[in-house]
Amino acid sequence: MQFSEQLWRAKAAFGKLREGVPLGGERVWPGLANDLFVAHLSIYRFFSRFCGGKSVLDVGCGLGYGSYFMAFAGSRKVLGIDIDERAIRFAKRRYQAPNLEFRVGDCERLDLPAGAFDLIVSSNTMEHLENPEKFLKAAKLGLQPTGSMVLAVPPITNEQLLADNQENPHHLSNLTIGEWLDLFSGLDFDVELYRHTHPAWQELDFASYQRSRFHDTEFLFQQSEREGLARDQTLTAVFLLSLR
């Protein structure tokens, strides 16, 4: 590892400790705008296309930066929930707005008032659940009849990608794109599928701690078919779900 990379890594670790954020895991740290953070922020920028004037639930909000982004992107109100109390403490302290709230909550034990939300979003959380179907059923009850969900997951399209995700101890439900689509269809959702990509794909380094030279606005979200995700390079698979 180069000395400059070691310095960036140390800076990130110090920032987390100073803010009471635990080290390790897959939590994206907003204190350092590296390639990984910028790519994740771009997902929330995509979510924001659908949040104008709406009541939004951000499931697995992590440290809260995405909920905050949507609160200033025209949402009527945003509620971010995460199972980690330390993450929610950080989010409440760092990100404040009149239309923004954070709560500790278990995504697999949601108890939402019927029709409480116009939009439910989740970025890279579904793969961390043991039973994503349980979450989807509860979320469906919490949606307005005209509501929608936007969910981002790893794009598992072949055996190698499946094996890679299965080796990740944080990923508990490693569904393929086809399995996700079957699950959504079985719950009576209409689905639009998007591939998340970047023009300079080969230059992205998600393991690096150095500040990114890219911006979240550069990432692309292209509507696709299932075969398109298997054929073309895809950072994340994004599903737009609408109630039938």
Image (cartoon, grey):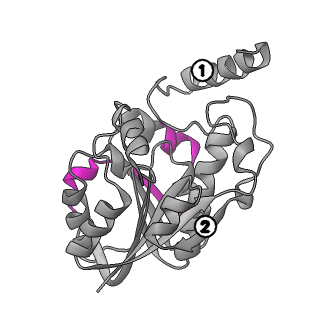
x, y (%) of residue 214? 77, 48
Between circles 2 and 1, the one closer to the viewer is: 2
Magenta stretch: residue 168 in it? no
x, y (%) of residue 68? 57, 55
Indicate whether 184 appears above or below 127. below
Identify which residue is drawn at 39% across, 39% down: 165
Question: CA separation, marks 2 and 1?
Answer: 31 Å
Q: Quadrant of the N terminus?
A: top right
x, y (%) of residue 24? 47, 24
Badge 1 amino acid: Ala
Residue at mark 2? 221
Badge 2 amino acid: Phe
- Span colored in magenta: 90-112
Q: From this viewpoint, is residue 173 visible?
A: yes
Label ID, residue 1: none
Indicate whether 194 appears above or below 235. below
Identify which residue is drawn at 50% across, 25% down: 20
Residue at mark 1? 13
Q: Quadrant of the C terminus?
A: bottom left
Give left or right: position of 197 versus 51. right
Element assignment for label 2: strand
Magenta stretch: residue 104 in it? yes
Q: Earlier in the sequence, mark 2 or mark 1?
A: 1
Q: From this viewpoint, is residue 96 visible?
A: no
Specify few, some or many for label 1: CA neighbours under 10 Å numbering under 14, 14-19, or 20 or more.
Answer: some
